[in-house]
Image: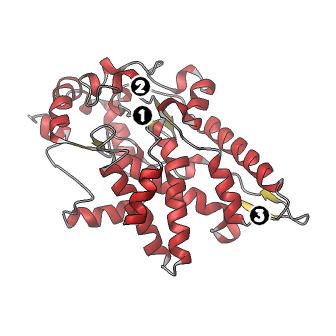
Amino acid sequence: MKKILLTILFSANVLALETDNYLAWDIQLDDSSQKINQYLEEQIHIGLSEANAKREIQSCFDVTKKIASRFKAKFVHDNPVEKWLRLHLDHGQYYPDTMNYVQKSLYRVPFRFYIPKFGLAQNIQVNDIYFGMDKLTHFTWTARNYFLIFINEIKNQKSPQEATQSAIQYGLLDELTLHGFWASGVYSYADLEANYQGLLFYKNFCFSGKDNYLRLNEIQKWELVRRPHIEDYISPKWDESYNLSYFLPENWTKIAPTLSSNYCSLRQSPKVVQRFNFYRNFKPKSFSENYIDSLHKQNNFFTPFDKNQSLENLCPTN
């Protein structure tokens, strides 16, 4: 646990944006997967070139770390994947068309004074799943810490399951502290799923057997032999209007009136009902989801939950 906390503190310069997925409930966005895949592949090739330029042959683990460094997040608006997407997505692929829409969002009464100054991460769509751009920073950068913890635990003779649980535990503590409650007063379960899927992404470079993304070729250079597809990792659990966040009680009282007034009626609209039916029939739960569910059942401190924080509770039924 001490090592996990130190990892969190050493990443203290990173501050992700919040997002409001409810704003996209009645919006139809065009799919962004092609652009996201383009970005990922470009960065992988740059990372490979940098690794292959070394005098000594790099291990596949070191090459993966070099690739991960291409996604280094710094401070709010300086998160590479989000900056790239804002420049390259077409108008119909994101909503709202500005980041300065706090007054239209759940955060119109901000939990922290700086939220209006930073703006909110915009909504995008992949495979009919809606989520905030910020999830891709979790997928590419926060997941790097998951990956490093996983590898370290394997080196310490932990089983893959134990190593994965240790990586997830890092994410749980991170949401309770620096990048959750301390930053915004929000504990995002959607962030946790994006983190975990990013761990799977990084494991696929070297640790998935014959299906690895990378291989060392005959001239002893690393090359990409299987292209990553973001569609393989996106889950409805990235959508914070479906996979609900936990809000500190004083913050819940600020957003509950907006949820009640703006979304009680909309939640029964054909578009929202259809979207959530699709979500419910999605692929089986991930290892991270099942692990977090098991902690919920134990009322574990690391997985805060309040059944009253939902539209079902806010919206009376006839």
Q: Secondary structure at mark 2?
A: helix
Establish if 298 lies above or below 158. above
Callout 2 amino acid: Phe
Q: Which of 292 and 156 lies nearest the eye of the viewer?
A: 156
Q: Sequence-wise, which precedes: disc 2 or disc 3?
A: 3
Residue with the mark numbered 1: 17
Rendering colour mode = secondary structure
Q: Which of 27 and 254 lies nearest the eye of the viewer?
A: 254
Q: Secondary structure at mark 3?
A: loop
Callout 3 amino acid: Gln
**Residue 12 left/right relative to 113:** right
Q: Sequence-wise, which precedes: disc 3 or disc 1?
A: 1
Q: Residue furthest bottom?
A: 157
Residue found 33% across the figure and 34% down from its top: 272
**Crowd class of label 1 (few under 14; some 14 to 19; many from 20; radius 10 Å):** many
Separation (CA) of disc 1 from disc 2: 7 Å
Residue with the mark numbered 2: 118
Q: Which of 146 and 316 lies nearest the eye of the viewer?
A: 146
Residue found 9% across the figure and 34% down from its top: 316
Q: Position of residue 205 (x, y in %)?
A: 66, 60
Q: Position of residue 99 (x, y in %)?
A: 44, 22
Position of the N terminus, as image quadrant, is bottom left
